Amino acid sequence: SVASIPPFLINDVLKKQMDFISKALAEKRSTFRKKLQQLENIKTENKHRLRPTLGLPENLELLESLCKEEEKRQEAEVAVINSKAEDLKKCMLENAEGFVAALASLS
């Protein structure tokens, strides 16, 4: 049982697990920030393409095209955020299971 494991061993396993989680999360955070930055750059490009003349009837196709591009960007942003949330849940679950398995191997 875990109660029979000396606290210093539990703390050692915990520290190793926390170090591993910190590294894994840092990598995931970096990838996520890069993806979000790419999407933010597209948003800025789309914003810079906005002009009052896009409201003219002869520019309707251009305006619709820009709107579609921005909608795709927004959908991609939501997908990236949802994927990140799922990835974090999976990472935490795997690491929690690893921690429990490491503790179990001590007893």
Image (tube, rainbow, N blue to C red):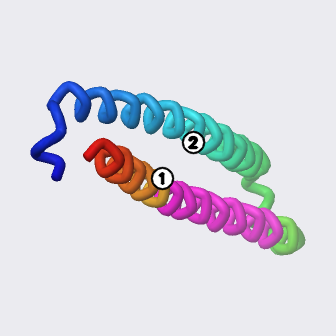
Q: Position of residue 86 (x, y in %)?
A: 49, 62
Q: Which kind of residue does numbered mark 1 sit on?
A: Cys
| Magenta stretch, main secondary structure class | helix
Which quadrant would residue 59 be assigned to in this image?
Answer: bottom right
For mark 1, what is the residue? Answer: 91
Magenta-highlighted residues: 63-87
* Closer to the camera in the image, 44 or 77: 77
Provide the secondary structure element on which disc 2 rests. Answer: helix
Tell whether 29 sits left or right of 49. left
Which quadrant would residue 73 be assigned to in this image?
Answer: bottom right
Q: Position of residue 63 (x, y in %)?
A: 78, 67
Provide the secondary structure element on which disc 1 rests. Answer: helix
Q: Which kind of residue does numbered mark 2 sit on?
A: Lys
Q: Earlier in the sequence, mark 1 or mark 2?
A: 2
Q: Is residue 37 above or below residue 70?
A: above
Tag in front: 1 or 2: 1
Task: Measure the C-alpha gap from mark 1 to mark 2.
Answer: 10 Å
Tell whether 44 sits left or right of 90. right
Q: Residue at coordinates 16% horizontally, 32% vertically from top-left? A: 6
Q: Is residue 87 above or below residue 22?
A: below
* Closer to the camera in the image, 7 or 90: 7
Residue 73 in the magenta stretch? The answer is yes
The 10 Å Cα crowd at callout 1, few under 14, some 14 to 19, many 20 or more, is some
Which quadrant would residue 48 be assigned to in this image?
Answer: top right
Q: Residue at coordinates 40% horizontally, 30% vertically from top-left? A: 16
For mark 2, what is the residue? Answer: 28
Residue 29 in the magenta stretch? The answer is no
Q: Is residue 17 above or below residue 105?
A: above
Q: Residue at coordinates 12% horizontally, 43% vertically from top-left? A: 4
